Image (cartoon, coloured by chain):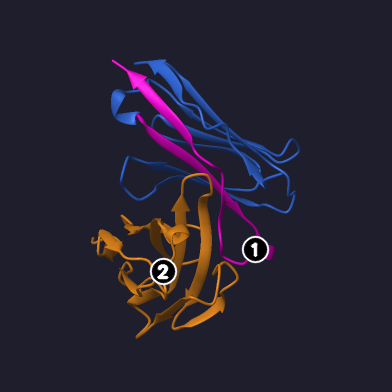
Amino acid sequence: QKEVEQDPGPLSVPEGAIVSLNCTYSNSAFQYFMWYRQYSRKGPELLMYTYSSGNKEDGRFTAQVDKSSKYISLFIRDSQPSDSATYLCAMSSMEYGNKLVFGAGTILRVKS
Amino acid sequence: GAGVSQSPSNKVTEKGKDVELRCDPISGHTALYWYRQSLGQGLEFLIYFQGNSAPDKSGLPSDRFSAERTGGSVSTLTIQRTQQEDSAVYLCASSLWGYEQYFGPGTRLTVT
């Protein structure tokens, strides 16, 4: 079993929809949680960073962490065709040093 | 400001040849990371540098892989006697402190 599980999709939604992307993890020691967006043939771009549990909002993006359920989410409001990309969750903890453990990524397609 | 840059963007090499991949981190970032992204394996950590030293080399898949960093800046990842399974996108990231890592565009390596 992988440490971080993420549904690869693809997830296809109409423009303007609210998108929910999720990851589950097995190691309760994870404390730092990131979401990256990766366009085709580009490097991952850091979208959101969250420490421990709770919510964080940045524009149309909201990241949620539920450590009791070992579950993290990224919500995208008013989705746009330009949001079409692969979304990767990543996480880490002191025991991992500075390396990030990534989910497999979810392919998102927003149709205009 | 300038982001992480990597060169070459694409590299095609014959099996058995050596290759060198270069990473220029964001100016002032003391930490540098190499990851590998391949179909079926996702994004995998290879090595982490803090300054010029590499406290974590745990992700290097074999002794054919090595990396160095000079002057606390540029890093080179070297793969000796390349094999077809080395074909992947090699990503470099840098950070000012551990968990907010910023990625370059990657080098797409194809071993024929």
Q: Tell me the quarter of the image containing the N terminus of chain A.
A: top right
Measuring 35% from the left and 29% from the top, which residue is drawn there?
A: A84
In the rendered image, residue B92, in percent from the top left (x then y), is placed at 39, 63
Assess whether residue B87 is covered by the magenta stretch: no
Question: In the displayed structure, would residue B61 be above or below residue B101?
Answer: below
Q: Which mark is residue A34?
A: none
From the rendered image, report the letter of the chain displayed in orange. B
Measuring 51% from the left and 70% from the top, which residue is drawn there?
A: B47
Q: Which mark is residue B82?
A: 2
Which residue is label 1 attached to?
A96
Quadrant hosting residue B108: bottom left
Q: Secondary structure at mark 1?
A: helix
In the rendered image, residue A56, in percent from the top left (x then y), is placed at 52, 38
Please state which of the two labelled residues, at mark 1 or mark 2, is closer to the viewer.
2
**Amino acid type of disc 1?**
Tyr
The stretch of residues the image draws in magenta is A84-112
Regarding residue B98, the answer to whether it shows in the image is no
Q: Tell me the quarter of the image containing the C terminus of chain A.
A: top left
Question: In the displayed structure, would residue A21 be above or below residue B19?
Answer: above
In the rendered image, residue B88, in percent from the top left (x then y), is placed at 41, 55
In the rendered image, residue A30, in percent from the top left (x then y), is placed at 67, 52
Which tint is chain A? blue
Q: Secondary structure at mark 2?
A: loop
